[in-house]
Image (tube, rainbow, N blue to C red):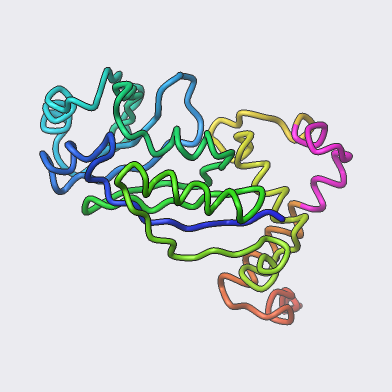
Amino acid sequence: MTSIADIEIPADGTGTGELFEAVPSLTCEMERVIASSGHGLWLSGPSQEDIETALDDASAIGSYTLINSEDDRWLYDMEFEPDTIDIFELILEENGTVLSASASSDTWLLSIRFADRESVSSLYDRFDEAGVTPTIVRLFDLAEETKSQCGLTARQYETLVAAIDHGYFEIPREVSMQELSEELGISHQALSERLRRAYRALVTSELNVSEDETVAPPVPTN
C-alpha cells in the first residue's frame, strides 16, 4: 500500500551541511525536473556571490553549474563528492520518490512517496546508520488517508502525482495531456475529467468551501 512520509533531516553532516554553516540565511528548494545526473537545487537568501563562494569552499560539493535564475534565487546543478551523505540518493536506493524537498535553518523537510511502510522503515535505518537521524513528521497510507486529507480519491491523487512527476504542471509543460493519458492507460477525455474533478476537490477542501458555495449565483437580468 502506497505510503507518504513527511520527514525532517538536519542538513549538518549531509552534502549541504557546509553551505548552511557558511551562509545561515540560505534556503534551498529541489527542482522537480532537471536534465542532469546531479541534483537541481534553487538557492536563495544570501547574494549570488556569497552562495557561490560557499559552493566553492564546500568540500562535499564536487561540481556545480548555474542553470537558471529567477528574481533573487538561482538554480544550480550540483554533484556531491562520492563519500558524501547524499540524502536524495539514499531515498532513490530505497525506491522512494521525492514529492517535494526544501531546506532552511539547517533543516531539510521532505515529502516522500513509498510503495509500503517497510521502505519507510528501511530508509529511516539507512539515515540513522549514516549518522543523520531523521524525524518523521507525518506518515500515512494513501488509500486510508488521501480522501480525508485533501478531498481526493486515491485515483485522483495518483493522477495528480503522475502529472507532477512527468512535468505536466511545469512551464513550459514537459508532457502533453495526450502523452500523460497514454502513460496512465486512460483516454484523453477520462484524464481531462479526472483532473477537473481533482482540481474541484482540492479547491473545495483547501479553501474550506462547501459544494453549495461552489455553485455560481444566478446572473442578474437587470
The residue closer to the viewer here, 133 or 193, is 133
In this picture, residue 184 sits left or right of residue 42: right
In this picture, residue 84 sits left or right of residue 122: left
The quadrant of the rendering that contains the N terminus is bottom right
What kind of secondary structure does the magenta stretch mostly adopt?
A: helix
Residue at image position (47%, 58%) is 6
The residue closer to the viewer here, 80 or 23, is 80
Please determine whether, in this image, residue 183 is positioned above or below residue 119. Answer: above
Residue 72: in sight, yes or no? Answer: no
Residue at image position (14%, 36%) is 47
Q: Quadrant of the rendered structure where residue 175 is?
A: top right
The percent coordinates of residue 139 (x first, y second) are 54, 63
The percent coordinates of residue 190 (x first, y second) are 87, 47
The residue closer to the viewer here, 12 or 130, is 130
Residue 105: in magenta span = no
Q: Quadrant of the rendered structure where residue 71 is?
A: top left
Residue at the extreme front of the image, as rendered: 129
Residue 185: in sight, yes or no? Answer: yes
In this picture, residue 43 sits left or right of residue 182: left
Q: Which residues are magenta?
A: 180-194
Give the total number of marks visible in the rendering. Answer: 0
In this picture, residue 41 sits left or right of residue 212: left
Please determine whether, in this image, residue 219 is positioned above or below residue 201. Answer: below
